[in-house]
Amino acid sequence: MKETHLAHRNVVIPDWSFRLLKCLLLISLLIISGCGYRLSGTGSSLPPHIKTIAIPVFKNKSSEPTIHPRLTNTIRRAFLTDGRLKLVDDPKKAHLVLNGILEFYDLRAVTFDVNDRAIEYWVYLGVNVDVKDRVKGKTFQKENLRTRWDYRPTANVVNAEANRQEALDEAFRDVSIRLVSLIIDQF
């Protein structure tokens, strides 16, 4: 039996253990490469004819009249950041058109202190999207997304509003990330 001596330590390792380790590594690599594994954000489940997307400003059915442009811009930024679809301004020049409706915005006090003051709120959003494949002239995908984000108000009115706006932005980011995944990765 051949043995390998490590120079800096007084350890003897049989050669068969190195061969076993190499075999295990090789088998692991074969399994990983053969099972369809890929890094998120590097591939796409989109048909090959889809390269561009347009995202018009979402319609707003919510009780908050000015937040839908922020939602739309957050979704656009998510697609730009992802980079697998080119964002175009003109829906007539896009392969996909993502039309959306902000169905509802709700703010609910969910936790109260001993003086019955709200100390935690939840921001609820409901968004419906209809993605059209303009190349094939058909609906590509429809989704109804719901999200909730929490925040804690402060005694300072300015800070309390800043916390609410941050919670709203987080809810927008959550919807945006989910949309990118649903449309491009299709899961």
Image (cartoon, grey):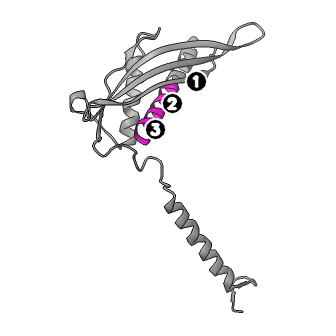
| Image location of residue 118, percent across then percent down | 68, 11
Q: Is residue 52 visible?
A: yes
Q: Judge by depth and name the residue closer to the eye, 70 or 160.
A: 70
Q: Is residue 112 magenta?
A: no
Badge 3 amino acid: Ser
Q: Which residues are magenta?
A: 169-187
Disc 1 marks a residue whose amino acid type is Trp
Instruction: Report helix, strand or loop for mark 2.
Output: helix
When the figure is inspected, residue 17 is found, relative to residue 77, above or below; the finding is below
Looking at the image, do the residues carrying marks 1 and 2 touch, with CB atoms under 8 Å apart? Answer: yes
Residue assigned mark 2: 174
Residue 149 is labelled as 1
Q: Secondary structure at mark 3?
A: helix
Residue at horizontal 57 percent and vertical 69 percent from the top? 27
Task: State the residue lying farthest toward the bottom.
Answer: 1
**In the displayed structure, does residue 63 sit left or right of residue 16?**
left
